[in-house]
Amino acid sequence: MSGLSARRVRVLRLLGRMPSVSKIESRRASHRRSFQRFQSIASSEEWKRYQTLLKYADSGEPERERARCEAEKTKFRKTEAYAKLQELKSLAKKRDIAWYLEQQRKGVFEDLLHERELFFEDFTTPDLDKKRWLPRFFWGDALMKKGYSFVGDPHCYPDDNNLEIEHSALVIETRPDERTALAWDKVLGFVSERFAYSSGVVCTGHSFRMLGGRVEVKLRIRHQPGVYHALYLVGDSRTPQIDVFRTTTGKKVGLMSGVLRNEANALVPEDGVGALPAGDDYFLLSMDWRGANLSWSINGVPYMSLEARGLDTPMYLVFASGVEPGATPTGVAKMEIDWVRCTAYDA
């Protein structure tokens, strides 16, 4: 396991070596525009003609034609073979084809050529897309078609009440809000419980699951001490669970990441990236899952990696916020999710 300290994060940001989200997105947009040009050339008649002529040149037929001309003392320049070779040379100098060949030689678009998008959501609709997102935990929907919370938590999860789409972002609010709600108790089962706070949760348990690949999310956090925010992957059992991130609940926002094997082994500060700004700054948080190898990064800068075997079940996305037991936040905390994207990389 390797980590990125809070001090190191601050230094990278001050030195400009942790790029801003706007710079990353601008660079990616430019890269994709270039890739569109690459694909356009690849589907052009000119490129198809170039490939046909290249295949002819590599077939050995021009050399045989040249040898025949030499044996018969005729001019190779007057043959169809010569004309095709000249056409090939001319096409290779064309601006688009020369550019295409250079990008191909450098492998500029290897990432996009092998990338396969599994899931993407940018919350452009006025309301939450219920075909993709459940506004509750998966098993509450599967068993009862209603949400539930947990006895011992200070907060409950009312359906939809703390979820809004604003300016093309999903906003999950956690706020002081006394109410009675259904809660799960390990001994008593489902009971009616009184809560001092309300929060929100969404998941893709009914619509999307993945077994490896990359998860990336663009978000920002309006922090309140005592409130945490999280994105994790989980299957039909509560563990194992892969935490793409979980924020700490102190005065500063910290990020922790890792893999939970059972309900007792909570993440610890050593699993974190350290203190990060909250407020107006957006961040890109990503997690790569390749077999037993997992790695995490923020704005493209790696901060942790580990090996975790036995992650062999498809997992779905869960965004959730809440209040730590014993905490008494007095204001409203928000997690604003601009978009989330899951991809696989084929060989």
Image (cartoon, helix red, strand yellow):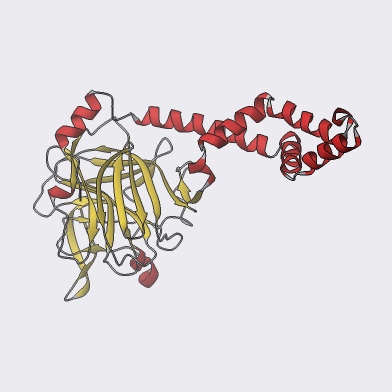
Spot occupied by residue 297 in the image (x, y as percentages of width and height): 30, 42
The answer to whether residue 232 shows anywhere in this view is no
Please tell me which residue is depicted at 24% across the width and 27% down the height of the picture: 13
Which image quarter: residue 291? bottom left
Q: Is residue 280 above or below residue 63?
A: above
Q: Is residue 206 above or below residue 10?
A: below
Q: Is residue 263 above or below residue 258?
A: below
Please tell me which residue is depicted at 20% across the width and 51% down the height of the picture: 1
- Between 301 and 183, which is closer to the camera in this rendering? 301
Q: State left or right for residue 133 relative to residue 177.
A: right
Q: State left or right for residue 324 relative to residue 137.
A: left
Q: State left or right for residue 330 relative to residue 294.
A: left
- Between 18 and 100, which is closer to the camera in this rendering? 100
- Between 23 and 163, which is closer to the camera in this rendering? 23
Spot occupied by residue 145 in the image (x, y as percentages of width and height): 39, 67
How many numbered circles are shown? 0
Which image quarter: residue 260? bottom left
Spot occupied by residue 294 in the image (x, y as percentages of width and height): 30, 53
Please tell me which residue is depicted at 36% across the width and 64% down the height of the picture: 138
Which image quarter: residue 79? top right
Q: Is residue 229 above or below residue 193?
A: above
- Between 52 and 124, which is closer to the camera in this rendering? 52
Spot occupied by residue 220 in the image (x, y as percentages of width and height): 30, 37
The answer to whether residue 190 shows anywhere in this view is yes
Please tell me which residue is depicted at 15% across the width and 65% down the height of the picture: 264
